[in-house]
Structures are given as C-alpha cells and as structure tokens.
Amino acid sequence: MSRITHDLCDLMGVPHRYRSRVGRPHEQRSFARLPAPANPGGPASTASESARAKCDMVRLRFEPFWLCQWRDVVFIHLEADPDLLQKAVPFELDLFECRAFVSLVAFTLVDMRPRLGGRLIRWICRPFGTHRFLNVRTYVKCGDARGIHFLAEYLDAPWLNHLAGPRLYGLPFHVARLRYDHADAARFRGVVTAEQGQLRYEGTAEGISEGDCPTGTTRMEQPVRTSETDLRHFLLERYRAYTERNGRRGWFPVWHQPWRCRAIDAKLNDSSLLRQSGRWAESARLAGAHHSWGLDEVWMGLRRDTAD
C-alpha cells in the first residue's frame, strides 16, 4: 500500500484488517491496460483535448485516484476586471481576447470514491460521496498549461469533506446550505446560503443543442458563431485545477468526456456571496450561462506541486 493510500485510510478510519484490499496489484494492472486515445497530439478540438487529458492522466502514477459523477450542472459565467481579479488569484490569469472570466458552477457530486478498494471503500465513502457543490472558479495558466483556480467552494457535505479538501488539496471549502432545482428541462433555479452571503439565480433554456436532451424533449439546433464556440470551449474544457496550500502551489488532473451543454438565459437575483472572493465581484457582469445534464464518468487525481 502506498503512503498516500495509507494516509487516506487513516483519515477515513478504515480498519487495518481491511486495508490489504486497497490498491491490489491486479486492479492497478487491469486499469493500466486502458487503450491510449487515438491521435493525442491532433488538432486543438474539444474531443482531442479531452483525449489528451485522458492520455496524460493514465501516465501518472496512482492515477486516476478518484472516480465520481457530476449531475445537473449549471454554469453561470461572469466577465470581471482583469486587474481586480488578478489581485485575488495567486496564478497568472488566462484571458480570452484580453477578457477575464469567473464561472459559478452549481452541480451535484455523486458517488465519489477512490478507484481502488472495491465495494468496501465505496461503502465507506457513501456517507460523504454525494452532495451539492457551488464552485466559484476562474481561468489560469502555469507555464504552457492551462486550467482553473477555485476562488471559493461551497458545499453541504459532512465534516470529513471540509477536512480532506483543504488539507489534501488546498481547496477553499465553505459550509453552506444549497438548494438546486435543475431537473426541469426548461427552467432552473438555485439558492446557496452561507455566512458570507447568498447566491440566488434562475434561468430558462434557450434550446437543446449537441444532442444533450432528456427523454421526451425535442432537439433544437441553434447556429452558434465561431467566437461563441471558442469562448464556450475556453470556459468549459479545462482538465487541470491549480491550488495553493500552505504557500506551495500545486495542481491536480481531471478528466471527463467533452461537455454536452445548451445555452440558457440566466440572471442573478442575489450575488452577495461573491463579495468575499475579492473586489472583482463589485463590477463583474453576466456574460452567459450553460446547462448540462451531467457526466457519468469523471476522474480526479492527486495533488502535485508545480515545478516553479
């Protein structure tokens, strides 16, 4: 058993008599035989970027470490003043045509657990493996790599999540009450309440695109300008997260299939929760929104220090 796995077992209170089941060699070998994506160095498209991220991740030791699903995801994108936003971010901002963005990502995390360990570890993780999340994220780069940085994260998970996230990853977790109504095909709303303030939003669907429609709905094709497509790719297709823990910069990999989303009309009825993230929130303006029914397979990795 690796030292990292041993520390996680201590954190989760796994009895010693069961720890021999965690990280069995045959499980590692069977997963390592996953076929490499075709043409990982191909043109910069949504599909090839996801494929490259998958290829890069399986080459890393112990990866993927975590498995989960993301359900009923709403993205609300804000355009912020680059200078004000940079003051709140320890990494260099990644700009789109000299514009800086912050995205509010409201979703439900489902069945998060380590890849290794089988049914026992999955059962142990069940009490804290499913909960609602609100991520307040911006877009950064570190050298030639691009990713996201979390300005704040709000969740209604048990105490272990608030211990493990900041301690293992340097994630800025905050306790909150989250109520989401994302299941309707036409209307969406949510409320996040924390000590720092409240976020209330609502939205309506503009039309279902890219084949992402639930049973019983009609697919509606909408023309999308090239600039809008490029911005959508910039905001959604990110496969690294950068964090700072105890003054040390680091990152962890994420992989999933390319997002299948539809545009929605959204409005913020209360955004006081964002003020604690920095002065950028005072002048930020709504830039667009998306909805996705979610992803069935998401991989997340261990945190690693950056090379700088």
Image (cartoon, helix red, strand yellow):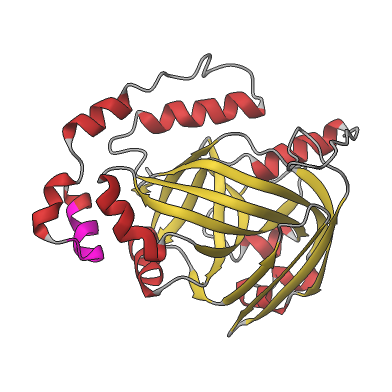
The one nearer the camera, 166 or 191, is 191
Q: Residue at x 41, y 18 (%)?
A: 35
Looking at the picture, tell me which residue is in the foreground, 98 or 116.
116
**Can you tell which quarter of the image residue 238 is in?**
top right
> Horizontal placement of 153 versus 79: left or right?
left
The reply to whether residue 264 is visible in this rendering is yes
The reply to whether the magenta stretch includes residue 124 is no
In front of the other: 177 or 197: 177
Determine whether 140 is above or below 80 in the image: above
Q: Identify the residue at image location x=54%, y=66%.
A: 153
Q: Residue at x 77, y 69 (%)?
A: 201
Horizontally, residue 67 falls left or right of residue 90, namely: left
Residue 8 in the magenta stretch? The answer is yes
Farthest residue to the left: give it.
Answer: 17
Judge whether residue 1 can be spotted in this image: no
Question: Where residue 94 sits: x, y (%)?
Answer: 64, 46
Q: Residue furthest bottom?
A: 195
Estimate the x, y position of residue 285 in percent, counting from the top left: 82, 63
Q: Main secondary structure of the magenta part?
A: helix
Residue 32 image offset from top left, x and y in percent = 31, 26
Using the rendered view, name the quadrant where residue 215 is placed: top right
Q: Position of residue 295 (x, y in %)?
A: 58, 43
The magenta span reads 6-14
Task: Farthest residue to the top: give it.
Answer: 39
